[in-house]
C-alpha cells in the first residue's frame, strides 16, 4: 500500500492506494473513512479489497483538517448536497482510478459511518456499485437514491444512530428498482466492522466489533461486486 497526493478540484489531498498482485486490469473501489479519519481499519479494508482483486484508493477527506472539515461535511449530508467539497474529493478519487490503465473503468464506492453516508450520496455520481456500512446522517433516502447504482448495505440492529434505517433503505431501493442487498445484523451495533481499541466500553455505548457480522458483510460485498463490476460498460 502506498501513500499519494490526489489532485482534487479544491486542492490536493492525501490518499492511500492498494494494488492487487499480478497483472491487471482490475475493477476499482474508493474506500471512505469514518469520523476517526484515515486509520488502520480503512487501510486494512483497502488492502483486503486489493487482495481480492480490486484496485483500491482511500482518500483522506480530512486532509484539510478534521476540525475544519467535519461540521461542513455533516451539514452537506443533512442537506443532501452532491456538489459539496467532500463529494468532489470522492469523485476525484474515482477519476484517479478510471484514469489508471490498470483499472477496468468499473468502480465502486464503499464507506463506514460518515463515509458510508457519503457513499450513498455519491451513488448517483457515476459509480457502478455502493457498499455503505452503517451510514451516518438522516438524509432522505427517497431523494438521494433516485438513479442510484446498485447498493449493498450493512447495518447493526443495536445501532442507536440507525434505528429502522436498514429496512427503510431496502424499501426505497425496491420501490426505485435499484438492485440491492441490504442486511441488518442482530446483536451488532454501530462500527461493528471496525476493530477499534477499547471494545468493552464501545459495546456499552452500542458500538463494538462483531467478527461474524463483519465477515458475512464482506462476503456479501465481494459477491455483489463480482456481479456488478465484472461485466458490461462502465459508468461515464
Image (tube, helix red, strand yellow):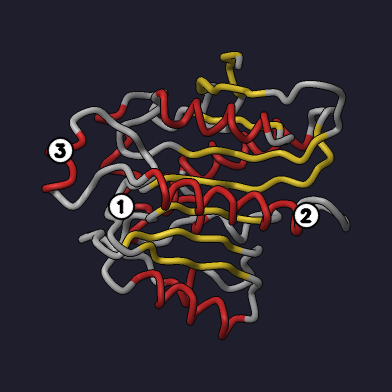
Q: CA distance from mark 2 to mark 3?
A: 43 Å
Is 16 situated above or below 164?
above
| Label 2, residues with CA under 10 Å away: few <14, some 14-19, many ≥20 | few
- For label 3, the SS is helix
Mark on residue 86? Answer: none
For the residues carrying marks 2 and 3, which lies nearer the camera in this image? 3
Q: Nearer the viewer, residue 57 or 91?
A: 57
Going from N to C along the chain, the mark reached first, 2 or 3, is: 3
**Residue at the front extreme of this rendering:** 212
Q: CA distance from mark 1 to mark 2?
A: 28 Å
Badge 2 is on which residue? 235
Badge 1 is on which residue? 75
Q: Are marks 1 and 3 in contact (CB under 8 Å)?
A: no
Q: Nearer the viewer, residue 178 or 197?
A: 197
Badge 3 is on which residue? 200
Counting from the top left corner in percent of width and height, residue 63 is at 41, 23
Amino acid at each position: 500500500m502506498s501513500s499519494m497526493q490526489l489532485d482534487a478540484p479544491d486542492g490536493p489531498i492525501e490518499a492511500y492506494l492498494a494494488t492487487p498482485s499480478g497483472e491487471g486490469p482490475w475493477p476499482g473501489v474508493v474506500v471512505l473513512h469514518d469520523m476517526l479519519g484515515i486509520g488502520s481499519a480503512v487501510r486494512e479494508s483497502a488492502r483486503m479489497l486489493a487482495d481480492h482483486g480490486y484496485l483500491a484508493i482511500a482518500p483522506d477527506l480530512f486532509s484539510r483538517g478534521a476540525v475544519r472539515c467535519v461540521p461542513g461535511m455533516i451539514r452537506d449530508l443533512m442537506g443532501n448536497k452532491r456538489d459539496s467539497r467532500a463529494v468532489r474529493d470522492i469523485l476525484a478519487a474515482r477519476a484517479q482510478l478510471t484514469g489508471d490503465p490498470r483499472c477496468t473503468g468499473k468502480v465502486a464506492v464503499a464507506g463506514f459511518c460518515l463515509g458510508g453516508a457519503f457513499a450513498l450520496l455519491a451513488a448517483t455520481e457515476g459509480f457502478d456499485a455502493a457498499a455503505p456500512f452503517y451510514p451516518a446522517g438522516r438524509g432522505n433516502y427517497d431523494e438521494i437514491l433516485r438513479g442510484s447504482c446498485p447498493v449493498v448495505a450493512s447495518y447493526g440492529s443495536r445501532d442507536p444512530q440507525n434505528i429502522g434505517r436498514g429496512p427503510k433503505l431496502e424499501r426505497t431501493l425496491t420501490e426505485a428498482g435499484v438492485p440491492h442487498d441490504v442486511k441488518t445484523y442482530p446483536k451488532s451495533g454501530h462500527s461493528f466492522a471496525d476493530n477499534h481499541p477499547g471494545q468493552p466500553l464501545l459495546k456499552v455505548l452500542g458500538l463494538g466489533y462483531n467478527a461474524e457480522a463483519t465477515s458475512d458483510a464482506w462476503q456479501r460485498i465481494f459477491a455483489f461486486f463480482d456481479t456488478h463490476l465484472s461485466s458490461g460498460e462502465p459508468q461515464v
